Amino acid sequence: MAALNLTQRWLPVALLLAFGLWAGRRYGRRNRWFAVGLILMVTGLAYFYGAKKGLFGAWPPQALIADASKVWPFPAPPSGEHVKDFLDVAAAIATIAGLIISLIPFFKPESKVPVLDRARRDMLNLVRVRWITGLLNQTLNEEVQLTPRFIAVPDALQQSDDALPRLNRGNAKEFPAGTSIANIFEGCAERLLILGAPGAGKTTLLLKLTRELLDLAEKDGAARIPVLFPLSSWGANQLPLAEWLVEELVGPRYRVPQKLAENWIADNEILPLLDGLDTVQAECRAACVEAINQFGRQKGLFSLAVSCRESDYEATAAKMELQGAVLVQPLRRKDVSAYWERLGEPAESVRQLLVGDPELWSLLDTPLMVDVVTRAYENQSAGNLKAHGSIKERRRHIFKTYVARMFECLYIASAAAPVNVTRVRRLCAGFPGWLISSFVTI
């Protein structure tokens, strides 16, 4: 019975102290003020409960009184009642102070810096996974590449008196061989228009620029977050660009919380890389250009890149108010030959074909066509490559062969269904029309 009574007396104290220690460890990592206050408050309550129930026996003990007399601040020696009153006051102060301290976090706004840092890291990682790891790295051979050439075309931009000096103002001028798109972007105050023929590699250039900017943003916390935005959806509602950017960030591609997306755009934290002005409906294209220009006027200090087909941009009444514009140059024969030589044996049959049919060189002026021909006729015998007819018919034949080979590879790679090459070729026979119209002008 005595043991039971002792347990009943001390159990609440033990539970209070255990709860204080647990809560301190549980919440101390998140908020030290709350943990410290809770421990003080629980300790004070445990003291009052123990003193009231007589858990401490004769309180205070003579040993404690003797120790207290050594540091007692008053002239008269302390009595038991004096020490008890002093301890009661100290426990009361600890309890009240603990309550106040534990409430501080509820009145003190929590810093959002760690949350914003995590959101920034998550966004950088998402952009890299979606566009670089998931797209650019899957289509680009880092070891063997075609190096694009650029010329500055300042006349493609809207001239204004209050604009900064433009990139290579005056006559069009070619950049030195090997100049990267990232260097050009930096050299024109990070406001660049990229023009080129269909298949010239404008989207690939934007992806390479995205990769360079991601590397910078991951090292420099003050750098803007580069985000690729396909412009094809702008014409649906024709919103102001800032509102459209928020809508795209919140949408299924990125799923950024609404408030965070609005803050990022308002605070100029996002570096928009706008791909495919030519994919905006022709009747809406001038309005899209004006929306981009208006965005720049409102922001003042901003970074932005846009890509567009040269012919579609020239047909647009409005012009961009940016600091630089470059035109991707057609590939030269020596560049393509050097590329195939680096590829080695897989491209040998294509090189032999061009020796006997030099007219085919007229088709190989863009990275797209070089890639299509290389993939379509890789490791094929020269006899299988001969095609007759006009250049237009040869182009169509090349795309038909390319699509058929890609589907054969797709079916062969899949173990889910048996390969029926005849059926695949029949299915592919109707594809080249829309495929060609999507990439090239026939």
Image (tube, helix red, strand yellow):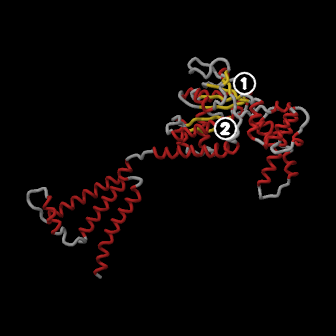
Residue at 76% x, 41% y: name it: 344
Q: Quadrant of residue 361?
A: top right
Determine which quarter of the picture holds residue 42: bottom left
Q: Nearer the viewer, residue 35 or 341?
A: 341
Q: Secondary structure at mark 1?
A: helix
User: Which of marks 2 and 1 precedes in the sequence?
Assistant: 2
State yes or no: discs 1 and 2 in contact (Cβ < 8 Å): no
Residue at horizontal 91%, vertical 36%? 388
Q: Is residue 413 left or right of residue 45?
A: right
Residue at the extreme left: 76
Estimate the spatial distance between the alpha carbons at disc 1 and disc 2, rounded to whole Å. 20 Å
Residue lying furthest bottom in this view? 1
Q: Is residue 182 above or below residue 4?
A: above
Q: Residue 224: where, in percent of width, then height?
A: 54, 36
Depicted 98 relative to depicted 352: above or below:
below
Residue ID at (21%, 59%): 89
How many numbered dots are placed on residues in this image?
2
Inspect the image, locate mark 1, and give the three-letter code of the amino acid beneath it.
Glu
What is the three-letter code of the residue carrying label 2?
Pro
Q: Position of residue 81 (x, y in %)?
A: 15, 65
Mark sitting on residue 109: none
- Give the residue at mark 2: 230
Relative depth, front residue between 400 and 29: 400
Q: Is residue 110 visible?
A: yes
Disc 1 target residue: 314
Residue projecting furthest to the right: 389
x, y percent for residue 336:
76, 34
